[in-house]
Image (cartoon, rainbow, N blue to C red):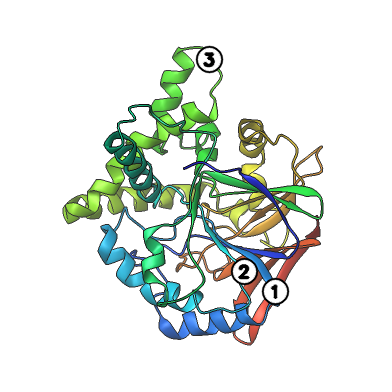
Amino acid sequence: MTKPNSSERNGKIIAISDTHFGDKSQLLNDERLVDRFMEVLSGRGAIAELILLGDIVDLWMKTLVPALKHARYFFHSLSLLENVEKVMYIPGNHDHQMFLDAFRLEIDVRVMQGNLTVPKFMPARSYGDTILSGLAHPGSRIHFPMTYPFVSRRVNGKDVIFTHGHHLDFYATSYGWARTFWLGRYIIRRRRKKASLHDIEMANIPFCGAMSMWPWVPELVNEGLRFYHVISFFERLLHSNRLRESPLRDSLVKESYKEIEQLLPQLGHPHPAGFIFGHTHRPGLGKLPDADTTIANTGSWTRSPDKSIPVKTWIEVDNDIKLFKLGREGPELLNSAAL
């Protein structure tokens, strides 16, 4: 079902992404780390909304049930937090199948009711609950609704956009031949038509759909990882100087500025006060050039081969946009910017 995609939030919003439950690089399958993180979240004051900003379960590495087994303790613990008013789940590319499954179920229900119309796919669809709620503590008031691919929130009268960020790959020029959208981009350019959000999503579906089939054949996953590691090696080699810059400035998120400027109009918000995304596993804060839009990346909760890039990070939005890291002694403020 579809619902309005923008709503006012009077309290703090926290966004985390890229936990990749089911992947070998996951960190939050460690129950002790989950307990530490939940203790930190419980001490952050009233949280109006906690947004799970994509790639929460990794359905490119594991099929659904094995991936959810890795995530069970996290969601069970999260559902017990008394200071969290609500949770929102926004899938990314590695858990894109979660959205497609919900969309197909919606169509199945329509057909069973004799309705053969196809629901509008974009700009966003919302579902009041997901199977993630089955991992919650029995009787918990917290549920796990889903909206894809983005939500807009009014914070202190200003628009803030939250999305995973994989749609930015459509506009990326580097390593275009190895990215999700290269074939779709080629086809759309041949049509000499400016891509809409619907076009970008249609280009996304075949790739994400194919990748979600890989875990059923483990040999495919192994070969895919080998290819990915080769690509990642050359990317780190060619961009090593740039990646050594401090993540406390905008040196990491600025690599996405041009793509963000092109995507924002497709979301119906060309000049929001804030744009929060994940996907790159590179936490940071910055400002769009010649615009009053603060850009923030949530980072990841996975092991990183680059020790200079912080992990175990999240974003908080209230009067300011803040980037935090879970350190040895608790939450560490890495950077902040006025909203």
Compare marks 2 and 1 and give the one earlier in the sequence. 1
Q: Which residue is mark 1?
A: 46
Residue at 64% x, 31% y is 262
Q: Is residue 318 above or below residue 200?
A: below
Compare marks 2 and 3 and give the one earlier in the sequence. 2
Q: Residues within 10 Å of mark 2 (few under 14, many from 20)?
A: some
Is residue 25 something that shows in the picture? no
Q: Residues within 10 Å of mark 1 (few under 14, many from 20)?
A: some
Measuring from the top left, give residue 115's x and y in whole percent: 34, 30
Q: Nearer the viewer, residue 63 or 47?
A: 47
Measuring from the top left, give residue 200's x and y in whole percent: 48, 30
Q: Nearer the viewer, residue 98 or 221?
A: 98
In the rendered structure, the answer to whether residue 1 lies left or right of residue 226 reads right
Mark closer to the observer (2, 3):
2
Q: Are marks 3 and 1 in contact (CB under 8 Å)?
A: no
In the rendered structure, the answer to whether residue 220 lies left or right of residue 179 reads left
Measuring from the top left, give residue 324's x and y in whole percent: 66, 70
Q: Which residue is mark 2?
A: 85
Q: Are marks 2 and 1 in contact (CB under 8 Å)?
A: yes
Type of amino acid under label 2: Glu
Local SS, label 1: loop
